[in-house]
Amino acid sequence: MTSLESYIEQNQYNIDYQTELSVIDLNEKIIAKMEELKINRVELANRLGVSKAFVTKLLNGNPNMTIKTIISIALALDCQLYQDIYPQGFKVTRRPLYIHANKGYEAFVPVTDEVLDASAA
């Protein structure tokens, strides 16, 4: 086991570790959606009614985004927020926080090796 794998195993349920994972995952999804829509930070700031500096701060990993801010970003990208929670030890191959297009749930297909319904775990 590498030192990184050991660190992850020891800290996987630590609040700071989980927060950082979620922030990184969310930011990657926002940036990917911005690239897909060919929207830069200035345009996203305009859609949100905030400064470009504020958007830059958010996308640089601000761990204190509110649900309202996250939903505002999703809506500005013509998306909606989808969340779920899982019991500890439940393994998914993709993080449980998604932004997906408002075109309907048929556009949202989680990628996982396991059932995503946490109640089934």
Image (spheres, rainbow, N blue to C red):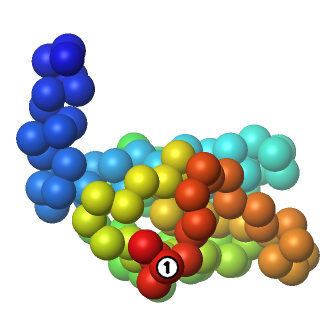
| Mark 1 surroundings within 10 Å by alpha-carbon count, few (fewer than 14), some (14 through 19), many (20 or more) | few
Quarter of the figure that contains the N terminus: top left
Q: Outermost residue, top direction?
A: 2
Residue visible at 17% across and 57% down? 13
The amino acid at mark 1 is Ala
Q: Mark 1: which secondary structure?
A: helix
**Residue 65, quarter of picture:** bottom left
**Residue 91, quarter of picture:** bottom left
Residue visible at 82% across and 77% down? 105
The answer to whether 104 appears left or right of 82 in the picture is right
The answer to whether 33 appears left or right of 120 in the picture is right
Foreground pick, 11 / 1: 1
Is any atom of residue 41 visible in this view?
Answer: no
Residue 76 position, x and y percent, is 70, 72
Q: Outermost residue, front direction?
A: 120
Quarter of the figure that contains the C terminus: bottom left
Foreground pick, 47 / 86: 86
How many labels sit on residues? 1
Relative to 121, say whether 12 is above or below.
above
Residue 57 position, x and y percent, is 39, 52
Residue 109 position, x and y percent, is 76, 62
Foreground pick, 110 / 25: 110
Foreground pick, 68 / 121: 121
The answer to whether 44 appears left or right of 15 in the picture is right
Relative to 117, say whether 93 is above or below.
above
